[in-house]
Image (spheres, helix red, strand yellow):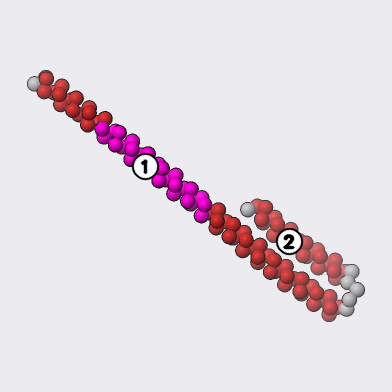
Amino acid sequence: MINNSNTVVGLLAGTVIGAALGVLFAPDKGTKTRQRISDEALAAKDKISEKASEVTDSVASAVSQKKESLDTQLDNVVSNVSHKAEDVITILERKLKDLKAKSKKLQ
């Protein structure tokens, strides 16, 4: 995600530097230069919007994958606990049976 934000910052910096150099070294009239800057600014805006959309989609996809992974892990934990609970109940029932047998012998 840091890489994507670096890309957006780099794109913005490149656009600003390019526009500034274009104004300084432009052989065209001021109206043409302003129009070119306007066109380039709109193109940069579109690129930034596209990049932001890609980053948003990427983050949403990563969150979705993490959620699915978490759901799977939670299901595994619940399943393991269920099996362990059955084992504990079985052991406790055996112990209770043994205690009842000992109690009968003592009476």
Measuring from the top left, give residue 7's x and y in whole percent.
70, 57
Q: Position of residue 53 (x, y in %)?
A: 61, 63
Residue 106, position in %: x, y? 11, 19
Question: Residue placed at 77% from the left, 71% from the top?
Answer: 40
Name the residue located 40 percent from the left edge and 46 percent from the top edge.
75
Amino acid type of the residue tagged 2 in the rendering: Leu
**Crowding near the residue tagged with mark 2, few <14, some 14–19, many ≥20 C-alpha atoms within 10 Å:** some
Q: Is residue 70 above or below residue 37?
A: above
For residue 66, the mark is none
Q: How many marks?
A: 2
* Residue that mark 2 sits on: 11
Helix, strand or loop status at disc 1: helix
Residue 37, quarter of the rendered image: bottom right
Look at discs 1 and 2 and give the one toward the viewer: 1
- Residue 21 is situated, as x and y percent measured from the top left of the image, at 85, 66
- Reading the image, the residue beneath label 1 is 79
* Quadrant of the image containing the C terminus: top left
Q: Amino acid at mark 1?
A: Ser
Query: From which residue to which does the magenta span run?
Result: 64-90
Residue extending farthest to the bottom is: 31
Q: Is residue 6 left or right of residue 34?
A: left
Between 18 and 61, the residue placed more toward the observer is: 61
Q: Secondary structure at mark 2?
A: helix
Asked whether, in this view, residue 10 is left or right of residue 87, the answer is: right
Q: CA distance from mark 1 to mark 2?
A: 49 Å
* Rendered residue at 55%/56% (across/down): 61
